[in-house]
Image: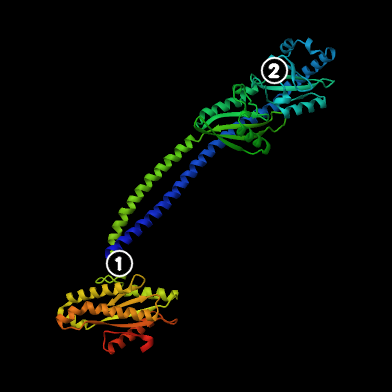
Amino acid sequence: MNKNFRLHLTLIMIAFSIFISLVVALINQEKIRNKLFQEHELKLSMIEDNILSSLHSIDKAYMLFDKDMAEMMEDYSEELISLYKKNPDFEQWDFKRLNEKYKMDVYILNNQNVVTFSSVHDDIGLDFGACCVNFSKLLDQRRNEGKFSHDGMDISLNSGEIKKFSYIPTPDKKYIIELGVSLEDGEIFKHFNFLEVEKELEERFSMVESIKVYNSGGFILGSSKKEEEDLRNSLDKWETFRKALKTGKVKETEQEIDGKKITYHYVPYKAEEQRGYSTSRVVEIAYNKDELNKALNQSRKEFLIQFSVIFIAAIVISWIIARRVARPMYLAFHDLLTGLNNRAAFEELVKEHLDKKKGNLALMMIDLDNFKMVNDSLGHTEGDHILKAAAHEILISAGKDNHAARLGGDEFVVIFPDIGEEELKKSASMLIKRMQRLFRDISEKNQIDVSISVGIAMASGEDDVDSLYNKADRALYESKKKGKNQFNIYQMSS
């Protein structure tokens, strides 16, 4: 039993050590995971702030410094209106010469918002009603208002070039004369070039696959993006883009491309001054989580190594501690000779069951008759052998649900947490018979009549450890008094 106790203690200590170590390791692992995610989010936020700040700066610069350009475009537009009044037949206009004169692109939009004439041949036939419904509505509104208007930074749909556009309807409102001037060669754009910021961020952060700025129609701003695939070719991306634009909140969608997961992060943006169609934009940041996943995998490996070391250390330390403390702990609640519970354990067990107040608690006290004669005649070695044999029989008779203890000398007890009186009698009778068989050889060889006397007490609601013990002791005294080798129940004979 001593070995079993040491094994149980070792296993308990190992389990406890591993549990505590695992909890600490998991908490540390979670902290590391959270830190990695926070760093990832911080990088993404930094990328957002950089590109939005760049857009804000260039919009603000144009708002403050493109007044001269707007006035020039208005003057040229009025000249073209005068030309229209003299000659409304655009077939006869020399758009190439007008482009050279004004250093601006010239477009004629009919009442369906289709480009019918232009100095930019590739843009002829461009149908805003088909490609850009909201922008087409804005053109209708401007046609009805009948006055000059101009936008801030915008995009040429076919080339992707950043331009500034102005619009003036003809007096008959059949057409809109549009002027466009490239901004990419201007000092403002060079100084606040958000396209350069995009490139810089893509090169600086390995997580970034690409950065694009879309106008509200889903077209990319910047000539470097003119070859890119149309956003509307991907339903998920298009819907996520529209949700971000509509709600004004950041939205994300994820796609797998060539076996690699890419997250598309859409950030809505509005210029401080709403001028035209393209001052409402959405920034698309396509990024991967390779760096994050690599760091997470490394963290998992470190966790497994750390836990393996802790696991081995816990086993070794627990085994060492168990060897040192198992015996003192065992002896604190067990009898050294027989391995049964000792008096301290007996008192704790009785008190525990009395406090529970469940079942019919009973105490069986057992005393070896004529044991002093065994020690005097056969010696203490033989006496110890008899005590151990008696303890073994008592433990077997008690069964696994009850508790056997040696209180000292030749005095034993069995605690029955829940038992009836008839069952108690049967148990006592069986124990006496087993002891008779056990002591038969000793009695015959050495002419010493060794037997047991048993006293039984049933606990009442008022009993404590001492009172229950005293009842059983008095019942035992009655058994001795009546001739030994028998049992007596306190309630019946006291």
Task: Assign the C terminus to one quadrant of the image.
Answer: bottom left
On the picture, is 153 further left or further right than 8? right
| Residue 364 in picture, x, y percent from top left | 33, 79
**Mark 2: which amino acid?**
Asp
- Residue where numbered disc 2 is placed: 123
Residue on which the image places disc 1: 330
Three-letter residue code for mark 1: Tyr
Q: Is residue 275 visible?
A: no
Check disc 2 and report its element: helix, strand or loop: helix
Quadrant of the frame with the N terminus: bottom left
Residue 316 drawn at (x, y percent): 30, 53
> How far separated are the C-alphas under marks 2 and 1?
96 Å
- Which secondary structure, mark 1? helix
As displayed, is residue 22 above or below residue 151? below
Give the camera-side residue of 9 and 145. Answer: 9
- Identify the residue shown where x is 68% and y is 16%: 122
User: Which quadrant of the structure image shows residue 431?
Assistant: bottom left
CB-based contact (under 8 Å), mark 2 and mark 1: no
Q: Residue 52 lies in what quarter of the image?
A: top right
- Which one is nearer the viewer's eye here, 101 or 173? 173
